[in-house]
Image (spheres, rainbow, N blue to C red):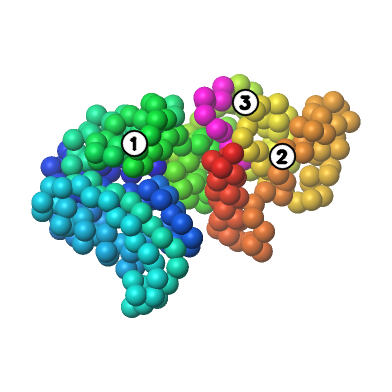
């Protein structure tokens, strides 16, 4: 989400005319959900998406007209046979939204939303003005609270972390990779959007959790190091904690932790091991995809709570 607001700021800085389109409501089936956003530029480019196909084409045409006359507008479209036959978009639902050709006037708000580390409410009022939505009174065409991205802490910088970290970053997680091996936890192997923490494990494991939802993933170079990290992280309030391994590994490590008094059964029940959505993954890349799928699933669960 913050990347989208950063794209608005970039368009403003580049002095590119654009209209902001937002889906403000959905009833029934739709190719996108409430809160979907897109920037429609005068040259036909689109950043973001409102669902693609004929729905997006219709809104793009309305955005073009809005850019020409400078007037914001609202839309309410029924996705029936008449609307979507050519593209096969016969969802049967109803989509409402707004088109805002003067969104650039809220530059200070977009800048704040793009970098904020705390939840920020904002919205579009009935007069199409864009403002911080501190109150929950009537008179809003659209309102939402933008949360900072969830953090993903990955213990270990081996093959799985190498495949997963850039994918998780694309999925808008704030990724940090921890390891004691600078040759592996290096900028040559991980993109600039991934934060690297290289030190002795006894120091790495004292890092304080950021003030946001934090997901933890343990994928070190072996069972002993996995257990070393788990011993500390199982005590922390992670929103999600997973560890790579088999059911047998889970039984052995968890039984030893309980026997040694390192964790309670309740604490260990929160640890997902094996971790990932069951897609029959075999290769490292497939394993990374399965874990990424589970991270997205858990994030959605938190957002619905």
Q: Give the range drawn in magenta.
A: 208-218
Residue 89 picture quarter: bottom left
The residue sitting at 29% across, 55% down in the picture is: 75
Residue 269 among those drawn in magenta? no
Identify the secondary structure beneath mark 1.
loop
**Residue receiving disc 1:** 139
Coordinates of residue 244 in the picture (x, y in percent): 68, 47
Residue depth check, mark 2 versus mark 1: number of the one nearer the observer: 1
The residue sitting at 50% across, 36% down in the picture is: 150
CA gap, disc 2 and disc 1? 44 Å
- Up-down relation of residue 77 to residue 264 (above or below): below
Coordinates of residue 219 in the picture (x, y in percent): 63, 43
**Residue receiving disc 3:** 205
CA gap, disc 2 and disc 3? 17 Å
**Residue receiving disc 2:** 271
Residue depth check, mark 3 versus mark 1: number of the one nearer the observer: 1
CA gap, disc 3 and disc 1? 48 Å
Coordinates of residue 240 in the picture (x, y in percent): 63, 38
Residue 172 picture quarter: top left
């Amino acid at each position: 989400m913050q990347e989208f607001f950063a794209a608005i700021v970039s368009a403003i800085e580049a002095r590119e005319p654009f209209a902001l389109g937002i889906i403000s409501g959905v009833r029934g089936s739709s190719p996108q959900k409430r809160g979907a956003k897109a920037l429609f530029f005068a040259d036909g480019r689109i950043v973001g998406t409102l669902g693609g196909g004929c729905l997006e084409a219709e809104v793009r045409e309305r955005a073009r007209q809005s850019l020409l006359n400078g007037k914001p507008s609202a839309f309410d479209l029924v996705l029936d046979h008449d609307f979507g036959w050519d593209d096969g978009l016969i969802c049967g639902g109803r989509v409402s939204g707004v088109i805002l050709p003067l969104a650039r006037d809220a530059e200070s708000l977009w800048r704040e939303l793009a970098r904020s580390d705390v939840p920020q409410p904002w919205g579009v009022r009935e007069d199409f003005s864009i403002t911080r939505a501190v109150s929950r009174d009537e008179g809003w065409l659209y309102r939402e609270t933008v949360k900072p991205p969830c953090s993903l802490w990955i213990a270990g910088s081996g093959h799985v972390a190498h495949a997963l970290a850039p994918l998780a970053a694309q999925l808008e997680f704030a990724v940090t990779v921890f390891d004691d091996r600078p040759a592996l936890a290096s900028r040559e192997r991980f993109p600039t959007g991934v934060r690297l923490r290289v030190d002795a494990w006894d120091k790495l494991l004292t890092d304080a959790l950021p003030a946001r939802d934090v997901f933890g993933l343990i994928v070190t170079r072996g069972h002993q190091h996995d257990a070393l990290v788990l011993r500390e992280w199982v005590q922390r309030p992670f929103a999600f904690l997973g560890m790579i391994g088999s059911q047998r590994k889970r039984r052995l490590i968890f039984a030893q932790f309980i026997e040694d008094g390192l964790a309670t059964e309740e604490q260990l029940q929160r640890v997902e091991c094996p971790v990932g959505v069951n897609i029959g993954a075999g290769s490292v890349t497939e394993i990374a995809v399965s874990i990424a799928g589970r991270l997205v699933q858990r994030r959605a669960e938190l957002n619905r709570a």
